Amino acid sequence: MDSSPANPNATDWIASLAEFLVREDHVEAVRVDPVRRKVSVATLGSVDMGALRDRLETVLAGGWDAAGDAWEKIRLRQLDVHFLMLAVAAGAVSIGAWTEGALLLFLFSLSGALEHYALHRTHREINALTKAAPKTARVLLPDGRIEERPVNRLGAGDLLQLKPDEAFAADGEVVSGESAADESNLTGEAKPVPKAAGDSVYGGTLNLWGALTVKVTRAAAESSLQKIVRLIREAQHLRAPSQRFTDRFGTQYTALILGATVAMFFVWWLGFGLAPFRSGSEAPSAFYRSMMLLVVASPCALVLSIPSAILAAIASGARRGVLFRGGAAVENLDIIDTVALDKTGTLTTGELRVGRIESFPPGRETEVLSIALTLERHSTHPIARAIVAHAEAAGVEALDLDEFRSFSGKGLRGRAGGELSYLGRRELMERGDLGDWIGSVPEPPIEFSEVWVVRKDLLGRILLRDEVRERSRPVLETLAAAGIRTLMLTGDRRGAAEEVAKRLGVGEVRAGLHPEDKVEAIRELGEAGHKVAMVGDGVNDAPSLAAAFVSVAMGGKGSDAALEQSDVVLMNDKIEKLLTARNISRHARRIIRQNLVVSLGTVVAMAGAVILGVAENLTLGVLAHEGSTVIVCLNSLRLLFLKDAEIG
């Protein structure tokens, strides 16, 4: 079954079906003798033309949509459950079982409507993310006038004026004013977030109680919220491994059931001397039982078991600030046994602050900062953001830059103000002519990290410090209690990394790693049989995220490269959302297993009952088949109603 809208004439058809079912002359069309296992069929001549017209109208109206879907599949040389249901309905009509045929199509359409409702409910949860996004914004022009402008015409640098209870039209930075924002549609939390000059705001979130002037930093179409919605819509089309299996199985299974039905028709018709299969050697009776087998063995509930749960899990996560980028992420996160975490921006806030600047010779600290600003101003790395913010606050200006080059995870090089300059880690600088001298400089205190600036006539270093995410400790403790191994993969110094690991309870530390070293560590763990989830946020984390069994990105301030490589995005930069994501995954896998038990169990039980002659009423088979489909859809919807206490 698919999620196409129900037939617009469904109401009229249901009404005519009700009238059809209550008329006694219609239910006399077929009788089943349970003792003799024979079917007596009313002759066409006993049915008046008015009744025949009513019957045809009812059956044709009920099967119209299914016929269209079946025809499209046949054109693609595929058979699906729509074809099976039409075949059964046509077969029932051919032997005069009009009531059963009409009831089958009615319940098939009803289950399709419920499936459509379930999918609509899921899509509605996702669409709610953007419901507050405005269509226009008030732009403050240089001459002081206010212009109402469509959101799609906003550009970086535009100044917007916001009143209380208005939504931000695009991502930006507060220039003036104080307020708070409701970012619940982005982060899943309704707690007001204070906003003042210099703070970031996000398109589609709500300004609560103050007037603000905001400078646009990104076009509305590239806002964080729109990017996340695009990722969600892409995720809905990425199938889980088990879903791909059931899709392939469903196609092959349909052909198998058709063949088995034909075979069983001849078994029941001819009997072959086997008592349970004897049908009195009457073709109509054998055909009737074959139609029952075709109904109860159809894989309708089976093909819905996984996708309905996956879509509901994606919507449930989006509402709570967790983005699953496809069914594989939903299925796999619950079965990981190792979590590898980057330090900066993951276990720490990533909001580095410049603590001290040193120059050699002393007194040229401003020049050191100016060179660092020149090389870092186009980067989004946490170190770059800290240096740029400190330089702007100090009123330091950047120099002209030429011949720029980046060494991934190591440093930068370029001509700053005409002079060849370097910025990077101690290990990179020690390879140059000043290596011995730099090596003699004591390493900074444990709470600081360092970045060196080297020019032919100047040497300096910038010391930065980061704040540990104190909420990381309970997360790591919960993972450890679940038997999951934790380790830190960081490019930072071992001393600083071990200090953070000790405070937070990380099980293992691997420090001083380049991006390629992190990838190698992930691959080694995978080759050893571990299912590794990598959690990171930066550009240099993208390769290791791509190598992991499940990749998790800190999405609020994470780089675009990290987001693109991730399977799961934690949209509000809270590491505790990792537990929320894993719990949703666990509930989704449980519901998928329940759905498979219901769908397969119903098929096995009812098919066995039909073959052994225990079930001889087509109406019962229809109710069992469509009932299992309804149960599967409603069971999947439970993921949308999970309480926060159940998933963290």
Image (tube, helix red, strand yellow):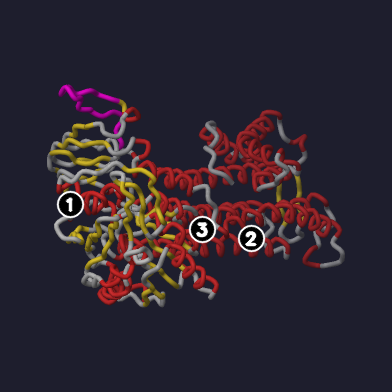
Residue kind at label 3, given as amino acid type: Ala
Residue kind at label 2, given as amino acid type: Val
User: Is there CB contact under 8 Å for labels 3 and 2?
Assistant: no
Does the magenta-highlighted stretch encompass residue 340? no
Q: Which quadrant does the C terminus fall into? A: bottom left
Image point 49% across, 46% down: which residue? 114
Q: Which quadrant holds residue 19?
A: top right
Looking at the rendering, the stretch of residues picked out in magenta corresponds to 133-149
Q: In the rendered image, which residue does mark 3 sit on?
A: 328
Q: Which quadrant holds residue 488?
A: bottom left
Q: Nearer the viewer, residue 230 or 609?
A: 230
Determine crowd level at label 1: few under 14, some 14-19, many 20+ residues with C-alpha closer than 10 A: some
Q: In the rendered image, which residue does mark 2 sit on?
A: 603
Picture coordinates of residue 569 (x, y %)? 39, 55
Q: In the rendered image, which residue does mark 1 sit on?
A: 366
Up-down relation of residue 355 to residue 482 (above or below): above
Q: Report if residue 308 is visible in the image.
A: yes
Mark 3 vs mark 1, foreground winner is 1
SS class, disc 2: helix
Picture coordinates of residue 364 (x, y %)? 17, 55
Q: Nearer the viewer, residue 289 or 537?
A: 537
Question: Cα distance, mark 2 to mark 1?
Answer: 77 Å
| Number of numbered tags placed on the structure image | 3
Question: Cα distance, mark 3 to mark 1?
Answer: 51 Å
